[in-house]
Image (spheres, rainbow, N blue to C red):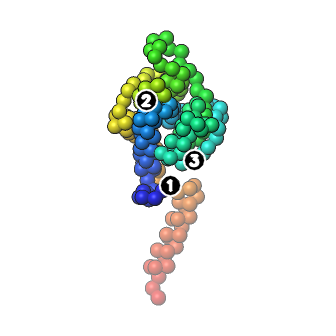
């Protein structure tokens, strides 16, 4: 992307991903465009991904804005994000059957809550009727939050799921080979000429 600093950090890719989600949610809220974005964490969402149209594309503000444009064929259903990629769009999700939920909540909100009841996913929901942004986590919903609050909450929730950087470890057999080479080198260097 033009104007973005090239980085190789896994953390920055995740941070950039949720920044694009926040910017898109803000656009949807301003335009009262309904949207449902589900972010996979530890529990895989393959079943739900397979119910939609596979995309396997880098998450970007532009792509999210395009997918949820009301005239777009993929705007109904959910977008599911795995790591920093949009796995699929127009996905079907389970609806929450929680009788305590407000009757003001429609299908989009019930689907966002439903996926978080069954998995550890996070759902960002924008209401088509009011433009309000909501965040569903663990079967509960935070309604009418600001883009700044969404950014803060995504940062908190996704920070715990950023995989730690793993250092390379010698493959079995390579350690012995490395020791043999080091020993041979030491012997060769120790020999008088």
Counting residues from the N terminus, which is met first, the one under dot 3 or under dot 1?
A: 3
Residue lying farthest to the bottom in this orientation = 193
Which element carries disc 1, helix, strand or loop? Answer: loop
| Residue position marked by numbered label 1 in the rendering | 169
Mark 2–mark 1 distance (CA, rounded to whole Å): 50 Å
Q: Is residue 78 above or below residue 84?
A: above
Packing grade of label 3 (10 A; few <14, some 14-19, many >=20) is few
**Label at residue 131:** 2
Mark 2–mark 3 distance (CA, rounded to whole Å): 26 Å
Would residue 103 be seen by someone viewing this image from the given angle? Answer: yes
Counting residues from the N terminus, which is met first, the one under dot 2 or under dot 3?
A: 3
Quarter-wise, where is residue 73 in the image? top right
Q: Nearer the viewer, residue 113 or 10?
A: 113
Q: Nearer the viewer, mark 2 or mark 3?
A: 2
Counting residues from the N terminus, which is met first, the one under dot 2 or under dot 1?
A: 2
Report the number of numbered marks: 3
Q: Are marks 2 and 3 in contact (CB under 8 Å)?
A: no
Residue 99 rendering spot, x and y as whole percentages? 49, 11
Mark 3–mark 1 distance (CA, rounded to whole Å): 31 Å
Residue 28 rendering spot, x and y as whole percentages? 46, 36
Residue appearing at x 58%, y 23% in the figure = 94
Packing grade of label 1 (10 A; few <14, some 14-19, many >=20) is few
| Residue position marked by numbered label 3 in the rendering | 57
Residue 30 rendering spot, x and y as whole percentages? 41, 35
Q: Nearer the viewer, mark 3 or mark 1?
A: 3
Residue appearing at x 49%, y 74% in the figure = 185
Residue appearing at x 58%, y 37% in the figure = 71
Residue appearing at x 59%, y 41% in the figure = 87
Residue 48 rendering spot, x and y as whole percentages? 61, 31
């Amino acid at each position: 992307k033009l104007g973005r600093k090239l980085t190789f950090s896994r953390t920055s890719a995740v941070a950039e991903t949720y920044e694009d989600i926040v910017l898109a949610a803000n656009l949807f809220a301003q335009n009262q465009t309904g949207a449902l974005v589900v972010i996979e964490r530890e529990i895989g969402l393959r079943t739900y991904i397979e119910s939609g149209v596979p995309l396997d594309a880098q998450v970007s503000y532009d792509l999210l804005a395009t997918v949820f444009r009301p005239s777009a064929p993929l705007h109904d259903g959910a977008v599911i994000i795995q790591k920093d990629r949009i796995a699929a769009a127009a996905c079907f999700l389970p609806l929450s059957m929680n009788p305590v939920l407000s009757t003001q909540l429609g299908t989009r909100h019930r689907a966002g809550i439903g996926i978080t009841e069954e998995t550890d996913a996070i759902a960002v929901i924008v209401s088509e009727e009011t433009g309000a942004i909501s965040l569903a986590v663990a079967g509960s919903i935070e309604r009418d939050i600001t883009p700044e609050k969404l950014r803060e909450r995504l940062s908190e929730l996704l920070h715990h799921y950023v995989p730690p950087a793993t250092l390379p470890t010698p493959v079995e057999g390579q350690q012995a080979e490395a020791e043999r080479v080091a020993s041979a080198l030491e012997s060769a260097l120790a020999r008088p000429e």
